[in-house]
């Protein structure tokens, strides 16, 4: 059976992190996110800087690539992935390392609020760009 790359996508506050933790069997499998770059590993504080966002994306991609190279059975990546091009590098990595890829959309039916103080206006802008490929 092939290894699996599971991409969890959804708006901030939808529960991507919670589902990633649940599905990874409490850390048995690696979980990566752009947010990791902005989270202090000691204090847990999250300090977002848009000017560094490209570095956060690169770090997430590189961590995924290293795990694939190490032949990890399951890898989880949870990002908003609101724009299709954000998914493309992971499709390429999956093909390169012969991984099955699954894209899971997480919806906010529980009325959760995002923990990163993303404004309602910004959430609406993200939602407008969000496309789902059903076929």
Image (spheres, rainbow, N blue to C red):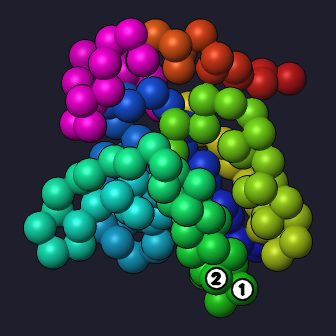
83 lies left or right of 48: right
Q: At x 32% / y 26%, what residue is drawn?
A: 118
116 lies left or right of 19: left
Q: At x 63% / y 20%, what residue is drawn?
A: 130
Q: At x 42% / y 17%, what residue is drawn?
A: 123
Q: Is residue 110 visible?
A: no
- Label 2 residue SS: helix
Residue 91 sits in which quadrant?
A: bottom right
Q: Position of residue 83 (x, y in %)?
A: 68, 30
20, above or below 104, in the image: below
Q: Position of residue 7 (x, y in %)?
A: 60, 49
* Quadrant showing the N terminus: bottom right
Residue 122 within the magenta-colored segment of the rendering: yes
Q: Residue furthest left?
A: 43
- Label 1 residue SS: helix
Residue wearing tag 1: 69
Q: Position of residue 76 (x, y in %)?
A: 53, 60
Residue wearing tag 2: 66
111 lies left or right of 7: left
Residue 90 sits in which quadrant?
A: bottom right
Q: Main secondary structure of the magenta part?
A: loop
- Segment tinted magenta in the rendering: 106-123
How many callouts does the rendering have?
A: 2
Q: At x 38% / y 10%, what residue is drawn?
A: 121
- Tell me the crowding category of disc 1: few under 14, some 14 to 19, or many 20 or more residues within 10 angstroms, Cα based: few
95, above or below 84, in the image: below
Q: Nearer the viewer, residue 65 or 103?
A: 65
Q: Are marks 2 and 1 in contact (CB under 8 Å)?
A: yes
Q: Is residue 36 visible?
A: yes
121 lies left or right of 53: left
């Amino acid at each position: 059976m092939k290894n699996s790359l599971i991409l969890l996508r959804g708006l901030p506050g939808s529960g991507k992190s919670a589902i990633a933790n649940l599905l990874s069997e409490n850390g048995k499998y690696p979980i990566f996110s752009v947010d990791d770059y902005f989270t202090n590993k000691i204090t847990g504080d999250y300090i977002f800087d848009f000017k560094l966002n490209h570095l956060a994306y690169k770090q997430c991609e590189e961590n995924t690539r290293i795990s694939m190279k190490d032949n990890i059975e399951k890898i989880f990546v949870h990002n908003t992935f609101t724009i299709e091009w954000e998914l493309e590098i992971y499709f390429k990595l999956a093909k390169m390392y012969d991984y099955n890829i699954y894209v899971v959309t997480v919806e906010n039916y529980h009325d959760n609020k995002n923990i990163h103080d993303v404004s309602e206006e910004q959430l609406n802008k993200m939602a407008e760009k969000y496309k789902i490929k059903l076929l």
